[in-house]
Amino acid sequence: MGEETASYICPLDFRYGRAEVRELFSRAARLERALRVEAALAQAEATVGLVPADAARAIDRAVEAGAVSLERVDELEAELKHDVMAISRALAEAAGPAGAWVHLGATSADITETALALELRDALTILRADLTELARTLADQARRHRATPQVSRTHGQHAVPQSFGYKMAVAAAEVLRQRRRLDDLSPRVVVGKMSGAVGTGASFGEHAERIEDLVMERLDLAAEEAPTQLVGRDRIAELTNFLALLSGTTERLATEVRNLQRTEIGEVQEAFDEGAQVGSSTMAQKRNPMLSENVSSISRFLRALALPALENMVQWHERDLANSANERFVLPHALVLADDVLTKLTDVFRHLDVRVETMRKVLADSPGAPMTEGLMLALVAHGVPRGEAHEALRGLTRGGVDRPATLAKRAHELELVTARLSPEEIDQALDPARYVAAAAAKTDRVLARLAPELSR
């Protein structure tokens, strides 16, 4: 570990998140976006005649050439105690005589809010791709295991037979619902502003609306329809609350893996590098669901990040600064970690060791006798009132049934059953194949409905 790395405080700097996503929120990337907004403003003002065309071109060239350095911005901020003034002053220096026209009529929030919109657009594009990849991975598992028998569980107890593929199809559908939510909220979240001090556009005079339109057109953004000095913070709160909702999905899926990997269940296992990976420093046998546990942990933190954004909706009059500092923490952490859990979860399911024979054995040996419902329905079909059939089977399983064979033996000896069903019909009613086949067919139907979305 180098000296610089050793001085890091936040685990986001060295432990969590993909480098390419962290880079979106780097100081260099944020400076570049702010400068692009300044250049777009100068170009727009030149179009309407407020700024000389050659000055706007010079400002644009300075931005494109990377003539503004972080070091100079930092020097100026230390002197001015104002981050955006430091950026505009550094750009003015780099643009030479044209620098006299930098930042004309704008307020700091015009620059920061519009740069934030560029940042959010890039981040949400990545998250959408992450959700698509996770949904496709789950759908692949659903197709592969459409008819793999598995006992379902409700209240942690064995219920009726299903297929592992259907469990995966349910997960794929949930992930695509989250992608729909993202698609729905993105236009509300990705908005900028170029409307002056408190949003009225007065500083731009008669050209205010045209200038804002031109800036947003150049940056390919929509504009906040009714800004104050800020873009409405309900937009940011909607985003962080969506990420909290998404974290519920990611932890749910991670928890499913963690539970199914429990030693006493053992139906799935995360990929484990037997040649190198260590599960415990003392218990050499351990094969822990490390990635799934990591996803669960980060998902809980993601949910917590929704609260500051809700608090930030409350501003004093046209704005205060109470949102500013915490957003510098919340947004990078929330978006980097959302990508982190989605990509990790995709890796978990892509390489998941699905133990088909264990699933078959658990179902075959189920002490919960999961086919009692099938037998009840067969009795109802032969004229037994449902309540009477249910009570009879409740009595049949009273005291516990150690193995399905015991249930079958009791069923073959119960007069209510034998008076209406032949031995073959009893065995057929207790056969899980019909339930598994129904789950496989339902998996196919779900995947067919999802197919158009999975392809885009």
Image (spheres, rainbow, N blue to C red):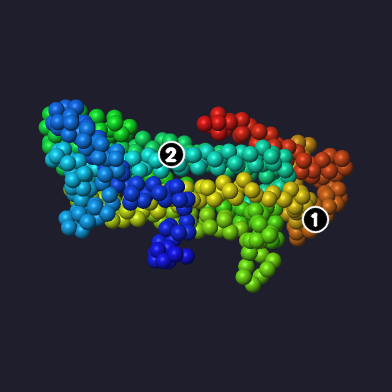
Task: Tell me, yes or no, whether the two marked residues, 1 and 2, touch with CB atoms within 8 Å.
Answer: no
223 shown above or below 240: above
Q: Is residue 389 visible?
A: no
Q: Left or right: 121 with respect to 158?
A: left
What is the secondary structure assignment of the residue under circle 1? loop
Residue beneath the point at 55% across and 31% down: 455
Quarter of the image holding residue 426? Answer: top right
> As drawn, is 445 to the left or to the right of 336?
right
Relative depth, front residue between 414 and 39: 39
Quick check: 381 left or right of 89?
A: right
Work out whether 262 lies above or below 408: below
**Percent x, y of residue 353:** 68, 50
Q: Quadrant of residue 190?
A: top left
Asked if residue 380 is positioned above or below residue 214 in the image, the reply reads below
Alpha carbon distance from label 1 to label 2: 52 Å
**Can see residue 402?**
yes
The label on residue 125 is 2
User: Could you classify mark 1 by the number of other residues whose Cα lies within 10 Å: few (under 14), some (14-19), or many (20 or more)?
Assistant: some
**Front residue of 302 and 396:** 302
Question: Viewer-proximal residue, 274 or 255?
Answer: 274
Query: Secondary structure beneath disc 2?
Result: helix
Residue 194 position, x and y percent, is 22, 37
Q: Position of residue 178 (x, y in %)?
A: 48, 41
Q: Which mark is residue 403?
A: 1
Q: Position of residue 324 (x, y in %)?
A: 27, 53
Q: Identify the residue at horizontal 39%, vertical 47% (top origin).
A: 24
Question: Residue at (52%, 54%) from the top-left corner?
Answer: 295
